[in-house]
Amino acid sequence: PTYKDHCGIASIKWIYKCPKTHTAWMEAVGRFIHEYKRNITDFLEFVTPYTGIELAESLQSTESVWMTIITMWESVITVIEEGLPIPPWMNKIYPQPITFLAEQMLRASSVGSDTQIRYVAGEYFKEVVSLMRAKIEGTLRPDRRMFYFSGHDGTLIGILGVLGLAEDPSGRLNARTGSALILELHKNLRTEIFYVQVLYIDGAAPDLEPL
């Protein structure tokens, strides 16, 4: 919405994608789609009668497959998380196969390669490191104790990728709505050596306790 016209929508002018990032994205997502093509096709064929999704259009390109899977996931998971009743047909796609397809698709599009990790989260992480370094050196202005950064699920998974946690086997680091990654700078009072403690809050966990 635009603040100048509360009844209208301000269209965003098309911005060209970074060629290097887009190429890496296409390769990683394309690999996942190729590997699970049968699963994806079966899934889309099943949901088509209930959703109005155009099957041929959804399978037309790498981008369209990605968009369809992610859109379906966000439509389903919000209903589940709010505790609303779901139609019987959704029981055949949730929790599986849609959870697996969506989470793996998100990982492929965010941390499918080192190039993606570098471009998606590299600058973000460099900013965090520079703030910590300034805090250690006493040059941080203003001298704050906490910084808050907001981002998308892909951003959060990108940071996990920088830390080498993108392929966490526990299945807990899935960047659900309300998830947070906390990077705490500490100082050992005995050795005077600084260290960083990494905590993760799973937005889907009932207690929201840091991991």
Image: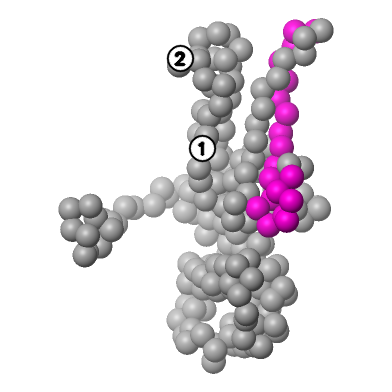
Residue 173 in view in this figure = no
141, 40: nearer the viewer: 141
Please name the amino acid that badge 1 sits on.
Phe
What segment is highlighted magenta in the picture?
Answer: 191-209
Please tell me whether mark 2 sits on a helix, a strand or a loop: loop
Q: For residue 26: magenta?
A: no
* Residue 22 can be seen in this image: yes
Identify the mark nearer the N-term, 1 or 2. Answer: 2
Q: Amino acid at mark 2?
A: Arg
Looking at the picture, how far across and down is residue 119, in whole percent? 51, 41
**Residue 8 percent location from the top left of the image:** 22, 64
| Left-right relation of 56 to 15 | right
Q: In the visual, does 19 lie left or right of 173? A: left
Quadrant of the frame with the C terminus? top right
Q: Percent position (x, y) of residue 143?
A: 50, 15
Magenta stretch contains residue 203: yes
SS at mark 1?
loop
Q: Residue at x 81, y 7 (%)?
A: 190
Viewer-nearest residue: 119 or 176:
176
Residue sitting at 58 percent across and 62 percent down?
Answer: 29
Residue at image location 77% in from the left, 13% down from the top: 188
* Mark sitting on residue 23: none
Q: In the rendered image of this protein, does residue 66 appear above or below residue 176? A: below
Question: Which quadrant holds residue 79?
Answer: bottom right
| Mark 1 crowd level (few <14, some 14–19, many ≥20, 10 Å Cα) | few
* Residue labelled with disc 1: 149
In the picture of the structure, the residue carrying the numbered disc 2 is 141
